[in-house]
Amino acid sequence: MAKVLVLGGGIGGTEAAIALRKEGFEVSLVSDKPYLYIYPISIWIPTGEAKFEDVIIPLDKFARRWGVNLIIDRVEKIDAQNKKVHLKSGKVLEDFDYLVVALGQTKRKEKGLENTLSICGSPEEALKIRDRLVELIAKGEGKIAFGFGGNPKDKTAVRGRPVFEVLFNVDYHLSRLGIRDRFELTFFAPMPKPGERLGEKALKMLDQMFQKYGIKKITGKKIKEFKENGVLFEDDTFLESDLIIYTPAGWGNPVFADSGFPLNEAGFIKIEETCQVVGYEWAYAIGDSAAIEGPPWTAKQGHLAEVMGHITAHNIAVKEGKKSGELKSYKEHINILCLMDMGWRGGGFAYRSDKRAMLIPIPVLGHIMKKAWGVYYKLYKLGKIPKII
């Protein structure tokens, strides 16, 4: 039985592990955390609608259910030339036939980034956003800035939806408390049309929502520096803020830099359509770790990472002669698919492909649907119900 080593216990890595086990492979999973953090539903931590324990899945339970060898440790180095993986504990992993890299990405460096908090960063950052918001609510007033950045070297490495979701959830939370009029909420982004990946109709709808809820907008201005009390733009205008919730564009994990794997300009691992690392028949990269190629609106998303995990498992099985058929490509599955939550006001179903771009409002029910998805996701990952989404 071929042995597969999966690096990363996130959305893509765990899905790859499930798919590989279903194909009959022996799987070892390395994660630097003892839990899977479910980013899509962590958006409710800042407003207190969800607790930390509500958005995690213990990996020991996951591993037992799927028969995966779990290793809680941090990957320190990947040595592609010698086919070895070095861990923080000092352990060296080399007893594997295939490697699947799903270590995610890191933040693109920006001046003063330490003065911001990201909903897409470490789990601890979501808790810090919650605590800072509680402080401002106790104070009774405040200015909060919400934004996300771009990466000219890899335009797929952008996280916009979670920022919009936290913004609208915070707006609703403050309104529910009856103190929204005492807070100034501002959205900012360096690109002229943030959210344009979803199409012009979606952009107009976002603008309408900003106007409806009294949210200010600053776009098309590059960010010069983040300071403790606000955001300084390239034209030296300053956005004063008590709390900056900002998600920078992604950058390749530092571990990739001296791995020997081919990288693009932003430090992501170059792959074939089959998810195989270019030049390495035994190595695959999926999700945020990979240099994804597609239409201009292509974005790294969790559902694509999961699809890539299944494609990788299928392609390895074909290579090993465990199943017949052709090798599959991730490119035919590229699309943008998400349910953008706005609190109990509802949400919006967003979809983008080569043929269609839409954002459909779903009042009230949209929020319930996302809540239901969170329940489904945890049950599925623990093997209690089949995959339906």
Image: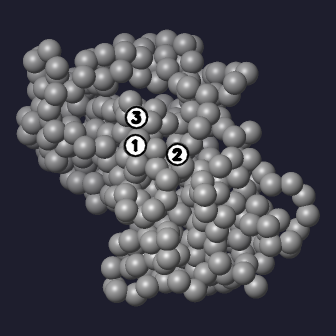
Element marked by disc 2? strand
Q: Position of residue 372 (x, y in %)?
A: 61, 51
Task: Indicate which disc, 2 or 3, sits on the residue closer to the N terminus.
Answer: 3
Pinpoint residue 266: horizontal percent, then vertical percent: 40, 43
Q: Position of residue 11 (x, y in %)?
A: 55, 59
Name the N-terminal-most of marks 1 and 3. Answer: 3
Q: Residues within 10 Å of mark 1 (few under 14, many from 20)?
A: some
- The residue that appears at 14% across and 41% down in the rendered structure is 112
Mark 2 and 3 residues: CB-CB less than 8 Å, in contact? no
Q: Which residue has dot 1 on it?
A: 266
Q: Earlier in the sequence, mark 2 or mark 1?
A: 1
Residue 208 visible in image: yes
Q: Quadrant of residue 172?
A: top left
Q: Which residue is mark 3?
A: 153
Q: As shown in the figure, which amino acid type bears the numbered disc 1?
A: Ala
User: Is disc 1 in contact with disc 3, using a CB cutoff of under 8 Å?
Assistant: yes
Element type at mark 3:
loop
**Residue 354 sits above or below residue 316 on the image:** above
Q: How is the image coloured?
A: one colour
Task: Tell me where residue 264 appears, x and y as whole percent.
Answer: 46, 44
Q: What amino acid is at disc 3?
A: Lys
Gap in angstroms between the C-alphas marked 2 and 1? 9 Å
Residue positioned 57% across, 18% down in the render: 199
To which quarter of the image does residue 374 belong? bottom right
> Closest to the observer: 309 or 52?
309
Secondary structure type for disc 1: loop
Q: Which mark is on residue 291?
A: 2
